Image (cartoon, rainbow, N blue to C red):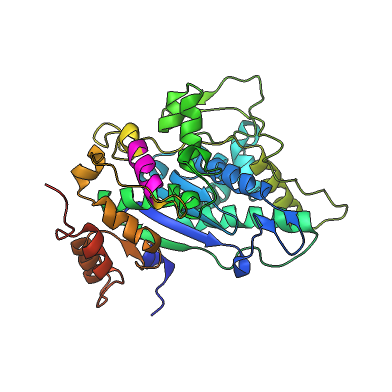
Amino acid sequence: MTRPRASLVSLSDTPWYHVVTRCVRRAYLCGFDRLTGRSFEHRRGWVELRLRQLAGVFAIDVAAYAVMSNHVHLVVRVDADRAAGWSDTEVLRRWRCLFRGPVVVERFLSPATRAGMTEAELEVIAGLVATYRARLADLSWFMRVLNESIARAANREDGVRGRFWEGRFRSQAILDETALLAVMAYVDLNPIRAGIAEAPEESAHTGIAARIAALRAGDEGKATGQHLDVAYRPDVGPETPPEVSPDSQRPIPHQRKTPASHAPTPPEPENGASPDARSTNLWEATLDRLPPAPLLPFGNPAEVPASIPFTFDGYLTLVDSLGRALHPRKRGAIPAELPDILTRLGIAPERFVEHAGFLLKGFGAAIGAPERLTALAARRECRYLRGVGRARALFGPERGLAA
């Protein structure tokens, strides 16, 4: 039975989610079209840039991603507490990175006109702040802006109208650390498993490749994903130093330019366009100027709550080891000495390789240990969740780890 999105994305169960969105009819709209001989590989750069830009506006962190030729994988963490800590002004400024919003918002954000606002207008602002705050910590709105902006740019490039994505998106709740590790590795190894890359660092438009590139460039913060809010401030000029939000105590950088090769072409202004069209064009242009946010950092959640609970070195070793075993043309042997991260979480690499292609199809709305799936089914008042049998094989105690 189809379940509403609100029950599938429940932050009371977990803040971690695996998200997949596919091009319509699974066509290679972000790859090479053999029928026409055209290459749309540059659109993979569009998607990668846009999701990193949106991570700086929403209270949603990106832990891993893989932008393929006809679909996109994301592993995200929704941080509702961070959104709750933003001031009203910060919420409105962030929302205006996405949409122009009503005129009353512009009046509130301008010191020159805020003092003259009526009590009724301030009540409207309070309602808008509550709505926008909820949306900025909403996975559905994150995916809506991501998918819609890419679809508009691609349709504009092709001179067509209609669907670009086959639907909204599919999500899986990630219920524990073991499942998080498995899903992140599955996502980062997607190009290798598909046979289009030989090594993680060669997997273009993936989170693991971005982290390795930053590490090679000597920027350890970007490699491990040092967290930084990077919401664009439309009223801050390029020469103005970054300000610090009094609520988050995180610097908000000024406007930066994005690489021209990755940015989608902005819409041309049309004479006589409707107010709605002008508003849409404005927020697309604003989105294109947002700087990309860093990926979610690896670290100790006790010290940094918004972090991936592993070490980057251990994860890198794991991905490298499993990548050699997963390549369809270069099946390699699992190393005799397993990475510490596998031993600690109790994942048998042979089982992971065997089940790596079924983490999406073999599980339903959630992925995790059998007892976590059973408990979630009870909370949702459903008889079972698909994937319990596969969870026992992949995460269960009978998986046959070497002593």
- Residue 237: image quadrant is top right
Q: Residue furthest left?
A: 403
Residue at 24% across, 44% down: 342
- Residue 159: image quadrant is bottom right
- Image-based side of 129 in relation to 344, left or right: right
- Residue 52 horizontal/vertical position (percent): 54, 41
Total count of labels: 0
* In this view, 288 is above or below 374: above
Whether residue 353 appears in this view of the structure is: yes
Residue 121 shown in magenta: no
- Residue 221 horizontal/vertical position (percent): 43, 26
Residue at 87% across, 55% down: 272
Whether residue 307 appears in this view of the structure is: no
Residue closest to the eye, 157 or 152: 157
- For the N terminus, the quadrant is bottom left
- Image-based side of 108 in relation to 195, left or right: right
- Residue 124 horizontal/vertical position (percent): 55, 52
* In this view, 66 is above or below 307: below
- Image-based side of 280 in relation to 168, left or right: right
- Residue 148: image quadrant is bottom right
Magenta part of the protein: which range?
316-325
Mainly helix, strand or loop, the magenta region? helix
Q: Residue furthest bottom?
A: 1
- Residue 300 horizontal/vertical position (percent): 27, 34
Residue closest to the eye, 379 or 36: 36
Residue at 59% across, 57% down: 147
